[in-house]
Image (cartoon, grey):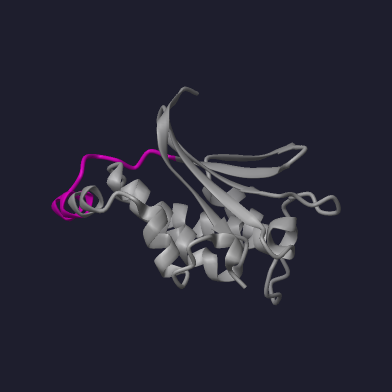
Amino acid sequence: MTTLGLIGTIHLPGRALSVHVARAFVREALRADGWQEVDEAELLVSELFTNAVRHSRSGSRPHGLVTLVVTEHTGSVRIEVIDEGSPERVPSVQDADVDGDGGRGLWLVEQIASTWGVRENLTGRAVWFEISDSRSGPVAGDLAFIGMLEAEPDFSERAGEMLGAWSDPREMP
């Protein structure tokens, strides 16, 4: 697998209200790169970001951050959700309770992604997944959308507005 380049990266507060910003960031970044089908990527980012908030130090400490990195690879896109890790929890696929409210996040990742994995170091953990390339050239709506992104390229500033205009995500309650 050859990495072709960075599509985008963003640092967000480790809070539940950041999940919708993470989804919007991935949607906009992939659309700008020519991807037409982004629903699966949005769903899986939502699941992994929620897990990072619920189960890592990024969500349990006041100024925790979660980072998204979107990279293009030969024939696929890789999305990494990087959190501050947790000494007591290791990501693993659970047997989901049919009647339960949770426990399906990594199961969904395993079912939908072409591949996925976990990478850890001393400062945190990255849970990543890859989805096969769905690009077949931009459509008219995508071209207009790409024009909007070119007119306003700094999504990080808009993400701050979406989170309530905090100038620094660590100031978030």
Q: Which residues are magenta?
A: 132-146
Asked whether the viewer can see residue 31, the reply is yes
Q: Position of residue 91 (x, y in %)?
A: 74, 50
Q: Position of residue 95 (x, y in %)?
A: 75, 60
Q: Is residue 20 above or below residue 135?
A: below
Asked whether the viewer can see residue 104, the reply is no
Q: Residue at x 46, y 52 (%)?
A: 41
Q: Looking at the figure, which quarter contains the C terminus?
A: bottom right
Quick one: which residue is furthest to the left in this view?
140
Q: Residue at x 46, y 73 (%)?
A: 164
Between 131 and 61, which is closer to the camera in this rendering?
61
Q: Position of residue 18 (x, y in %)?
A: 53, 65
Marks counted in the figure total 0
Between 69 and 173, which is closer to the camera in this rendering?
173
Q: Position of residue 34 (x, y in %)?
A: 27, 43
Residue 41 located within the stretch drawn in magenta: no
Horizontal placement of 98 versus 140: left or right?
A: right
Q: Residue at x 64, y 45 (%)?
A: 127
Quick one: which residue is furthest to the right in this view?
88
Horizontal placement of 34 versus 39: left or right?
A: left
Residue 136 located within the stretch drawn in magenta: yes
Between 126 and 95, which is closer to the camera in this rendering?
126
Horizontal placement of 132 versus 111: left or right?
A: left
